Amino acid sequence: MGLLDKIEELQKKPESYRKRVLVVLMALIMSAIILVWVSTLNLSGGKEGQPFPPPAENKKTAAEYAPFGILKDATANIKNLFNEAVGKLKR
C-alpha cells in the first residue's frame, strides 16, 4: 500500500479523525524540527567571548556528524541541562 493509497483512505474518514491525524503529524514534524534546531545551538555554556570550544577540543568523528549522531548529542545535552536545572531547583 503506497502513500497515495493511504491518503485516499484518509480522505474517506470523518473530518474529526482527519483533524486528529493532522494534529499528531504536525506535532511530530514540529518536534523533529525543534530537535534539529536545538542541536545547532551552543549548549556548552562557554564564556561569552568563546562561542565555540577551541579547535583541539572540537574534533569529532564522521559518526558524530551523521544525523542520528547529532540527534543523540542533542538529546544528551538537553538531558544534562534538564538535570542541572532540576538540581538547582532542589537546592
Image (cartoon, rainbow, N blue to C red):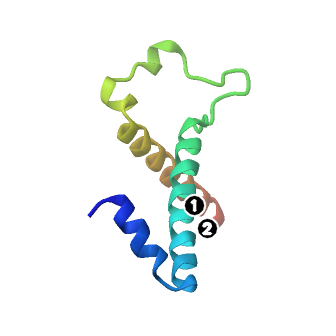
User: Pointer 2: residues within 10 angstroms few (<14), some, or many (20+)?
Assistant: few
Instruction: Tell me where residue 89 sits by quadrant.
Output: bottom right
Estimate the x, y position of residue 47 in percent, counting from the top left: 68, 28
Q: Which mark is residue 87?
A: 1
Q: Is residue 41 above or below residue 22?
A: above
Estimate the x, y position of residue 39 in percent, counting from the top left: 53, 40
Q: Secondary structure at mark 1?
A: helix
Q: Which mark is residue 28?
A: none
Residue at 37% x, 67% y: name it: 6
Residue contact between numbered discs 1 and 2, judged by CB atoms under 8 Å: yes
Instruction: Tell me where residue 54 sits by quadrant.
Output: top right
Q: Quadrant of the N terminus?
A: bottom left
Which one is nearer the viewer's eye here, 49 or 40?
Answer: 40
Q: Is residue 13 above or below residue 79?
A: below
Residue furthest out toward the right: 48
Q: Is residue 76 above or below residue 49?
A: below
Residue at 64% x, 64% y: name it: 91
Q: Secondary structure at mark 2?
A: helix
Estimate the x, y position of residue 40 in percent, counting from the top left: 57, 36
| Cα distance between the residues tagged 1 and 2 | 5 Å
Residue furthest out toward the top: 55
The residue tagged 2 is 90
Residue at 36% x, 32% y: name it: 66
Q: Amino acid at mark 1?
A: Gly
Estimate the x, y position of residue 14 in percent, counting from the top left: 52, 86
Q: Amino acid at mark 2?
A: Lys
Q: Exactly how many numbered labels are in the figure?
A: 2
Q: Is residue 76 above or below residue 61?
A: below
User: Pointer 1: residues within 10 angstroms few (<14), some, or many (20+)?
Assistant: few
Direction from residue 73 to residue 89 in the image, left or right: right
Residue at 61% x, 34% y: name it: 42
